[in-house]
Structures are given as C-alpha cells and as structure tokens.
Image (cartoon, helix red, strand yellow):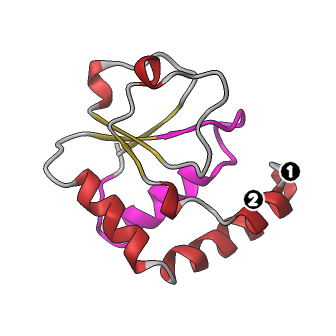
Amino acid sequence: MAIKRAYEEPADADGARILVDRMWPRGKSKATARIGAWAKDVAPSKELRTWFAHIPERFPEFAERYRAELDANPDGVRELADAMAGNERVTLVYAAKDPDHNNAVVLRDWLVDRGLARRA
C-alpha cells in the first residue's frame, strides 16, 4: 500500500486510488485526480483535524487519537476494505502538504499493523 498526495500526477502504477480525506482536494477535478473511491468515513473527525492543524509537534498525539477513532469506526474501515478488495495495488490519496505528518501515513500504518494491507 502506497500513499500519494492528490496534487501529484496519477500513475498507472498507483493501482486503485482511494481518497482518504473528509473534503475533496481544492482545485482538483474528479477527472484529473483519477480517484476510484472516496473513503471519507475513515478520515479524521473535523474536531481532530482542527486541533491538529498540521502542526508537526502535535503529530504523535494526532496519530494516537486518530488510531482510536479508527478503532471505534468498524463501518468506515469495512467500507475502505471493500474499496481495497480485489486490487493488487492500492494508493491512499491525501491533500495535505506535509508528506510525513498527515492522516494517510497514520491510516496506512494502522491498516498494516492490523494485517489489512501490506506496506509498499
């Protein structure tokens, strides 16, 4: 499983591209984004996203809180698993500018830790 910023050029090697943000990336059309599924129900809550505010120093606590939200969200996780099913390659797509401190990083690691995906 890979992660990729929504503003990077889509590639065939991405496989199934699943947007994992609650909001659609600004200025990106559906045609150019080449998103196959939008799993907004597994994105961090508005409250958590607002608190985090993409401040890198808050990332460890953000990750902990976000993992707790995922643990408490079996329906959203099931929806994501259904979108991933049958795809040899999956790329989680996110809009944040920071490639190291964003929800897709946490989500990918959470999925790998639970045996629901393999790290690319």
* Secondary element at tag 2: helix
Q: Mark 1 vs mark 2: which is more N-terminal? A: 2
- Residue under pointer 1: 55
User: Residue placed at 18% from the left, 44% from the top?
Assistant: 87
Most extreme residue toward the left is 86
Q: Is residue 37 above or below residue 22?
A: above
Q: Nearer the viewer, residue 98 or 73?
A: 73
Percent from the top left, x then y, of residue 64?
Answer: 66, 73
User: Residue placed at 34% from the left, 42% from the top?
Assistant: 120
- Residue under pointer 2: 49
Would residue 36 appear left or right of 109 to someone viewing this image?
Answer: left
User: Residue placed at 26% from the left, 52% from the top?
Assistant: 84
Q: Is residue 36 above or below residue 79?
A: above
Q: Identify which amino acid the numbered label 2 is placed on.
A: Arg
Q: Is residue 9 above or below residue 70?
A: above
Marks 1 and 2, how far apart at CA: 10 Å
Would residue 114 appear left or right of 26 to someone viewing this image?
Answer: left
Q: Which residues are magenta?
A: 93-118
- Residue 97 in the magenta stretch? The answer is yes
